Amino acid sequence: MKYSKYQSPISIKEVGILVIGYNRPELLEKRLLELKNCGAMNLYVSIDGGSESHTPKMEELKVFANRLFDNIQIQHHKENLGLVKHITSEITRVLTIHKYVIVVEDDIKISSKFCINVINGLTQLKINNVNGIVSGYSPIFRRKLHNYWRKTHVCYFWGWACSQETWRFYDFNLLNHSLDQELSKSKAWSKLNAYQRKFWLSRFHSVQINPLSTWDYQFIYISFVNNFTNLAPIFSITGNEGFNDPRSVHNQGIQPKNIKNSHLNEGDLRKIVKNSRWFRIIDMDHYFQGLKIKIKIESKKLFKRQPLQYP
């Protein structure tokens, strides 16, 4: 496909890659090595503060990281900002420097083609002139089959990316928002069934009351209200190693059986699959938050189709 000057593919040089860490130097080291394997540039490492994170092992890791990358900036906060303020302020900071940001937390395992694939997804959003995020996560893990992008109104934040334009809508404090009224105007929200609306609305009300409890539900709310078009792969290119770790904030339980970190898809992501029942099957799947949906694998014929071209 040929791009016009208004549709040129996004270069990795335009993207800042933000790695979020706290007190897990062994996981942070894994992510840095994976990003090096991805050909990452413009790397920003932000480590939240507090006595727990200022350890000799973390200092050794910072020295290792500076040797591993030529273009890396490491910020180790003196005080503990907390999850919400840490992540959101650092994303904002990187997006004052770059047009796009890729965000990887220290417990998020990435495939060898994660960076190039996510940047490809950002390019698809740019070509179609829509706001949204690009996620690397899917609840389905298949290593070898062809992979395609799918569109979803829900956001998955286990390895993801967005633009300056998309992030400007974000606000973790929903106190001054009339949730029901704003959602009632959303086309994306109107497509949900009663159970799905109840599921999400309860979470939106929860973070409205306690905005520092988490930051991602607020983004999902903004996504619905603004009818974002988010992209996620059919087969996951990211996993999560943070389960069953007492240092984790939200993933302290046992790792779900269907999260297979060794089965990340390593292929190049192709164009968006249209008219596929994949969208209906897995758009609202948040099994790791207690919602269980049976997933049936479609015929392999789907993955033998030629990539669809944009107009």
Image: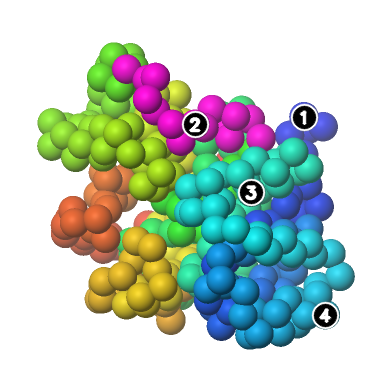
**Quadrant including the N terminus:** top right
* Residue 225 seen anywhere in this rendered image of the structure: yes
Q: Please, what secondary structure does the residue beneath circle 2 have?
A: loop
Q: CA distance from mark 4 to mark 1?
A: 38 Å
When the figure is inspected, residue 267 is found, relative to residue 192, above or below; the finding is: below
Position of residue 297 relative to residue 175, above or below, is: below
Q: Position of residue 248 (x, y in %)?
A: 40, 69
Indicate left or right for 85 with 223 as reference.
right
**On the picture, is 20 further left or further right than 15?**
left
- Picture quarter with the C terminus: top right
Q: Secondary structure at mark 1?
A: loop
Q: Going from the N terminus, do you reach mark 4 or mark 2 first?
A: 4
Left or right: 303 in relation to 22: left
Kindly identify which numbered label has been placed on residue 90.
3
Mark 4 vs mark 3, CA separation in Å: 23 Å
Q: At label 3, which amino acid type do we have?
A: Glu
Label disc, if present, on residue 67 of the rendered structure = 4
What residue is rendered at 30% in x and 22% in y? 179
Disc 4 is placed on an element classified as helix
Specify which label sits upstream in the sequence, 4 or 3.
Answer: 4
Prevailing secondary structure of the magenta residues: loop
Q: Earlier in the sequence, mark 1 or mark 3?
A: 1
Q: Which residue is mark 1?
A: 6
Marks 2 and 1, Cα distance to the nearest angstrom? 29 Å
Q: Residues within 10 Å of mark 2 (few under 14, many from 20)?
A: some
Q: Are marks 2 and 1 in contact (CB under 8 Å)?
A: no
Residue span colored magenta: 164-178
Q: Is residue 45 above or below residue 64?
A: above
Mark 1 vs mark 3: give the one in front.
3
